Structures are given as C-alpha cells and as structure tokens.
Amino acid sequence: MTTKLFGEPIPRREDPRLVAGAGRYLDDIDEPGQLAAAFVRSPHAHASIVDIDVTGALEVDGLVAVYTYEDLAGPLAQPLPLLIPHPSLRAARTPYPLAKDRVRHVGEAVAMVVATDRYLAEDAAQRIRVTYQPLPPVVGLDAASKAGHLVHEDVPDNVSAHLVQEVGDAAAAIAAAPHRLHLELHIERSASMPMEGRGVHARWDETDRSLRVYSSTQTSTSLRFALAAKLDLPVDRVEVVTPDVGGGFGVKIVHPWPEEVLVPWAAIRLRRPVKWAEDRREHFISSAHERGQQHSVDVGFDDDGRLLGLSVKFLHDNGAYTPYGIIVPQVTSTQLPGPYRLGAYRVEFHSLYTNTVQVTPYRGAGRPHGVFVMERTMDAIAAALGLDRTVVRERNFIQPEQMPYDQGLIFQDGRPLVYDSGDYPAALRLAKKLVGWDEFTAVREQARAQGRRVGIGIACYVEGTGVGPYEGAYVRVETTGKVVVATGLTTQGQGHETVFAQIAADQLGVPVENVNVVTGDTRRFAFAVGTFASRAAVMSGNAVAAAAGKVRAKALRIAGEALEVDPADLSIVDGVVSVKGTPQAAIPLASVAVLANPLRYAFDEQAKQATQFAVGGGIHRPPVAEDDEPGLAATGYYSPVRSTFANGVHAAVVETDPETAEIRILRYCVVHDCGRLINPRIVQGQVHGGVAQGVGGALYERIVYDEHGQLLNASYMDFLIPYASEVPAIEIDHLQTPSPLNPLGIKGAGEAGVIPGAAVLAAAIEDAEGIPVHRMPICPSELWELRNADHR
Amino acid sequence: MAEPMHEVALTVNGVPRGAAVPARRLLSDFLRHDLGLTGTHVGCEHGVCGACTVLLDGEPVRSCLLFAVTVDGAEVTTVEGCRSADGGLGPVQQAFQDCHGLQCGFCTPGFITTVTAYLRENPDPDQEQARDAIGGNLCRCTGYQNIVASVLRAAQLQRGGAG
C-alpha cells in the first residue's frame, strides 16, 4: 500500500468547494422556465375543511396552477406510505399529500400553488380562502392519554402503538429487592433544525418520459422507489439526485414528504421544472419534531447498588401521524439499559397521537431519553445508598470479558440486541481522570466556601450503530488512473467524500487525490438504504472496502498476466503495480484499466493497447472470461448480521448562580469509543457537533405548543439554538475497541455526542444545587422554580 | 397586477452587476437568483442565523433583512469574493478547511464573510475574542470548536504565518 490513509486526520476533500461558495444546495438549482411552489397550510391544530375558495388567487399575475386534494388521483390520492411497519403499531396513520376533509396539526398542507416565482406563489397562497370548522385539539401527553378528544376519529384511545418487552420477572425482582425507588422522568419536545430546510426540485423530460428529482433528503434511493410508486412511473424513468445537503440530523430521513410527491407531480403536469424550498417557519410547523416522552420508573437494588429489577413505563408523543413507525420509542426502550446488567427488565410504552407535528427521529433517536432515564436512576440509587455515583455504575457494568453480551431484547432492526464489544470500565476510568472526578469534592467545597455553587455529573451510554439491512458501493479505476467510487447513501456534512476516498485509496494503493466519491445519486448507484442511525461509515465504508478489494484483486490478476508473474508477488504503490522487490517490473494501474476492457475500437491513444489486434493471448478463450466482466471495476455490498454497539462516557462541571439561577458549563469532557477511527478529525467534529446539540437540548431548545395546538416559538428568535457563546470548550479522549462484526472494525460515530447531554447536565445541576432534577431541558427560571418548590 | 420593476446596479466582488427587480426583492434572493451567486445561503429569513451575511461597503449585514433596491450603488462582497487575489482559497476559507471548521457547509459562507470583516479590524484575536467574533452566527453541525480555531488560524495566515 501507499501511505496508510485509514486512521489519518486528512483535511476534507469537499471543503474547497464549500468554503468558496461553490457548493450546490437544493435552492441553488435554477433553470430557465422554472416555476416555484408554495403551500397553503392549516392555521388550526384540528379542523374540518368546509370549503376552499381559490378565486382570489386567480388575480395574481404569474399564477400557473392551484391544486387541492380534489385534484389528486390514483396512488397520489392515497395516504403517504407507512415507512416502517411494526406489529405493535395497531393504529398507524399517515397524512395525505394535501389534506382530505380534515387537518390534524398547524402547518398541514391544504393546497399547493405554482407560480412563476416564489414571491408570487406566496401572494397567491395568501389569497386562497379556506373555511374551517375547528375541532377540539389534543395537545400534550396528558390530554392524549385521557382521550377526551380524538386526533383520528377511528382511534378511540389516541394510541397508535403499544409495546412491551420483558427479560425475567421485573415486578417480582423489584418487589423482592432490599431497596426500591420510583422516579418520574420527563424530556420535552425538540427538533433537528438543520440550517437548510427541506427542498425539492423536479424536471420532467417529455421526450424521454423521464423524471429527475433533486431533494435535500437522507435517502435518495428509497425516495426514488416511493416516487415511482406514487406517480405510477417505471422506476427506470425516475432518477433522484441528492445535491449538497445543509444538515439533516434525522428529519430528512422521512420520505416521501407531501411536497416531495407534489412538486414532481406538478412538474409532470405542467411540463416545466418546479422547485420548492422550505422556509424556516414551514420547517417548524410542517416537517417533524422529536424527544417528547414521559417516563415512570421503578427500580429495585441491593445494598451495594446492584440492579435487581427495572421497570419503565413511558408515553411517547408521536404527533398527528406515524410515517416512521415506532422507531423512536423502540430505540428508547432498547437502548435504555446502556452499559449495565439490569437483572430483570420490563419496558412498556404507549405511543400517542396529538394534534402536533409528527415525530420522527432526531439525532440520537430515542437514546437521549433512554440514557436520561437510566443515568438519572443510577444517580438516584447512589444518593439513596450514599455511594459515589461512579461506584454504583462500576458495580453494574457489563465487563469486557462478558462480550458479546445479549441484553435479551429485540432491537430496532428486528434482531437480537447483542453488544459486540466495548470496555465500559476503561471508558469510565478515562472519563473520571479527564474531568478530575476524584478531586472534585474538594473543588465543590472550596467553591461553596466562596459562595459559589458548582456541581459535577457523569453519564454513560451504549449506542447501537450501523444498522442494516445493507449498503453497497461501486469502484472503478478509469484509464486515467483516477478512481471513481459511488455509494447510494447520502451525505449531509459527515465528510463521506473524504473517508470513503481514504478507504478506497488504501485498498487500491492510489493517492487519495485520485479518488472521487459520489453519494446519494441514483444514476450512479441504485441500491441503498440511507443515512441514519450512525450507519454510513460502518455500512458504506465496509461496502467500499469490499468493492475496492475486488478491484484490487482483479488489477493484480491482469497485471500478473501482463508482467507474467504470480499476482501474489505484486503490490500497488502510488497507482503503479509492480513486482515486490523488483520495482522496474511495473505497470501503471491506468494501463491495467485499459487492458481490463477488451476493445474493437481505438477511440483514443490508450485504447489502442486493448484492441483485438494489439492484445495477444489465446484465441481459444473468450476475450472476457465467463466469470469476469469488462472494466477494472467491481460492486461490493456489506450486510451485517446485526448492529455494532459504540459507547462512551460524558462528564460535565457546571456552575449555577445562587441568585439568578443562571447555568454555566465550566467543563465538558467526552470519552468516546466507536471502534477504529477512519479519520479522527472528522470523528472529533461529529462529537463536537453532537455535544452542542446535547447542550442545546439540555438547557435551551424546546418546542412549545399552547393548549390550542399553536406552536409558540416557530422561529430562531424563540427556539434557542446555542451560539458559540453557549457551547463550552469540549475535551475529548478516545478509546478504540474494534468491532468484530465488520472487516474494518468500525462503529458509528454520528449521533454519539448528543446522547448523554441531558443526563450529564441534569446530574451536574443536581449536584450543584442539591435538588433532584427530573425534567429536561431546564432553563434558569425553571431552576429558580425548583429552588422555591424545594424550600416550600 | 404586474409589479413595478426597479433597476439595481451595484458592485459585487469587484464586478459591476445589475438587474431589474421588484421593490420587495430581498438582497439575498437578488444575489442568489438574479445574479446567480448562490454561495450566500438563507437559513432563517429573519436575521437570526447569519448564514446570509455579506459585506455591504465592508460591513457585515444580513442580506435576508435588506431589499436589493436599498443597496443600489453599494459595494457588496459575498463568500465568492473572499478568494485570494490569485484565485485560490482566501486565508479565511483556507483556515476553515485547515481546522475542519465546517461540516455541511451551509452556514459557512456567513461565517467566512463575518470573520473576513472581523479580522480586518482585529488582526490578532485571542481565543475568547475569536469566540465573540462569531457570536452572531448559528452553526448546527460543528459545535463551534473548530470555527473558533479557524478564526485564529485565519488571523495567522493573514499575518503571513504558515505555522
């Protein structure tokens, strides 16, 4: 191999384009004759549609078309797909592309307007008069579970799904335990909030009868199949291209959105390109949210703090629809055990409809809630027994020698939840050292003596990453020596152009500059699943390695024939295949690529080498062998038997102001183990970004609905994403426990940083204040209220 | 009901540019869709995120909060204009790559214009000043750690240090 690239923190290959303003995001696509779409959205959380009067819109210059549900037919007039069916989803409901008779949340699309530009489309949308008959809205989990009013008239208890998993007899174990605790632990609603909203651009080629759709999506391949089905087109007449995407964090895995089917449909009907780029308010009221859950915990433990039984019942607010099934609560219920041996465990959840925006995964996808529950429980046990919080954790850890460890549960991929590897005690030791845990008692007391309140918290997590079913990759060496890599999953800033190039370059012995990576373009790779669940590096990384490995083997075989040596005696360095120890016996990879494609026509100088009168060889065998294909190219797939489990420990030190209740993070430390690192710089960046979202979710960000179902903070003025001033310096230490499940030994890293945020900051605030913190996020006024309640 | 159009002529990245637009055309839309300079991004349309920041006569402004007609005759610098004289990456752009100061890149143009203006007045910031300098721009990907480092690196590059 050339210089080893795997593990090197090389600069990102996508950056020169992006820092120069030469990225190409969805709304950057403009072409002649293009139309713009805008949507009329419900101002009511729950209402019947009595009448839609479009006459006012007709006066708008530039108006091209107005569509309502009445205009839809065939598959498009049916509800959008239920993406992840699950047996526990007893009353799944998905929306129509445009509301049919009834709206169920503020922001639901009622009509689509198409005009010559977006300003005019919005003018026309404002002139459409919709008459509504308001219905009583269901807002919040309390109202949903009381079921005094219904979100869907045919779902009498507002329950979409109910699931129980149990390992052992938790009730009996808790009843028999020497110590028991009950806790109520709540997490409020938040949202992914990528800086770029959703968007879709569609172009219909009438001559070719083909459709090209650009979408700011986390899955282009599945969107393509969904569009073919919804628009009744052959799959091969539909291509979906993901341009540069300005962040996703989960929300863009949902597909097809109403806008994603309607914009292409309009482009076909109007025979003109149509674009819709979501504005920020639309993103708040019509995409998806996450996080809102209420958990009720019963735990039994022994005198040493060892868990004997844990029972968790929780309510999940899924909003008005369930297109993404039960993934979020299912992940909470299965990732809640974390790095611990639980004894007996029972978990039960109800997923409930409310008249709010639908809930689908946001980075962490149920894990931040589960970790909050488990870690708050650990702290409560330590407090009850007067033990150090880290000691209780140590006593309950699964040990490295117990790996692989079967938690006895079924994970989100329908497969057994078996941890593949990890050293949880080592991670905790590192974190304690990094944050100075053992010295903190003195720090706390010293601060107290000065009238300051400081506290420390620690939180551990295990994260299932790299879920299946599969990803694939195509690798081809061009006759220029350049390498083309294509994989089907999409990119939203994770640096895939860099890390997949590192993997391919290592396998093929070429400089990384010679490798060009394409993601999320169905023209280049048709079979893929998507980017979610910290899976891209694990899945496509291993697929790229597999494909590049095949190409390498083929290159060595062809070079061996050309050089008349055993392929085992060859190596590839800097794009040249040569005999080990005899570097003058060599052939460039570019020439091998020429030879790999037997030709009749010499279309360029190089091609002459591969034409039929230039190539020697036996006349009694076919130019392309039966088990071979032309070209120095191969496709590879990676499909794991089950997920791989990353883990980590976060520790934080906070200071709370005794008078104002302001909360300031003094230290934030991360120990992170995602197996082998492909590019440490990129992994570190992923952790940084995750931590910032964790801090946001713990102290600042929340989606606030009033009792009428109006979203009160649908702007960046009021939904407080942290600025640089709110995110502390982040100190990171890595462990690298390879995964035995995949050839590269890697685990996912994308979501890790956010997962223990609420748990660790609640713990630190509790430690500073001496008041239990059982609900997150927490802002200064809420801390002030907690203090007052504590004094009463 | 056709809207009256207004000629807007200004200098963008040193080049005279112009177009006829309605009075309500936002500067951000004018730059992106009338002049084709799509490096300027729009994240919130209400002046909070800073992704649309451009330099108006050298000063950072939110182009989503300005009408194009109000800047007739002005000099505007966008991220496309932050390149170095030889056409390569400018020092601030280079610093963001060197320090992994971006992930999805959507907010990056607003940071690059903001930092460019800041360093002109403050060529040698310390860590805290660098953090303050970017305090009005939102990034959802990076957690700002590497953006702070990018500001310091850019200052170093501008001072001529390869370091």
Image (tube, coloured by chain):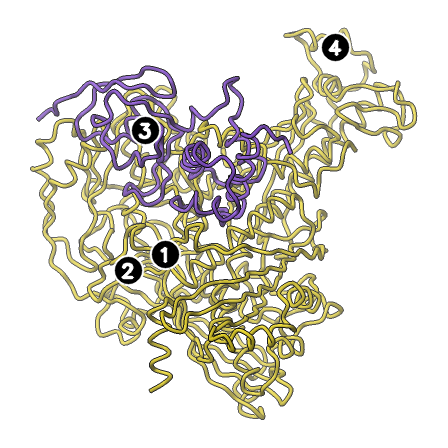
Mark 4, Cα crowd under 10 Å, few <14 / some 14-19 / many 20+, is some
Asked if the residue at tag 2 contacts the one at tag 3, i.e. Cβ–Cβ closer than 8 Å, the answer is no
Label 2: chain letter: A
Say above or below: A365 vs B146. below
- For residue A458, side relative to residue B48 (left or right): right
Name which of mark 1 and mark 2 comes first in the sequence: 1
Q: Secondary structure at mark 4?
A: helix
Position of the C terminus of chain A, as image quadrant, is bottom left
- For residue A131, side relative to residue A416 (left or right): left
CA separation, marks 4 and 1? 59 Å
CA separation, marks 2 and 4? 66 Å
Name which of mark 4 and mark 1 comes first in the sequence: 1
The residue at which mark 3 appears reads as B56
Front disc: 4 or 3 = 3
Asked if the residue at tag 2 contacts the one at tag 1, i.e. Cβ–Cβ closer than 8 Å, the answer is yes
**Residue found at x 29% / y 72%:** A157
Asked if the residue at tag 4 contacts the one at tag 2, i.e. Cβ–Cβ closer than 8 Å, the answer is no
Mark 3, Cα crowd under 10 Å, few <14 / some 14-19 / many 20+, is some
Mark 1, Cα crowd under 10 Å, few <14 / some 14-19 / many 20+, is many
Label 4: chain letter: A
Label 1: chain letter: A
Q: Position of residue B63 (x, y in %)?
A: 30, 33
**Residue found at x 72% / y 28%:** A510
Would residue A525 be seen by someone viewing this image from the given angle? no
Position of the N terminus of chain A, as image quadrant, is top right
Q: Position of residue A135 (x, y in %)?
A: 15, 63
**Do marks 3 and 2 share a subunit?**
no
Figure quadrant of residue A158? bottom left
Name the kind of residue labelled 2 in the image. Thr
Number of the label disc, if any, that sits on residue A356: 2
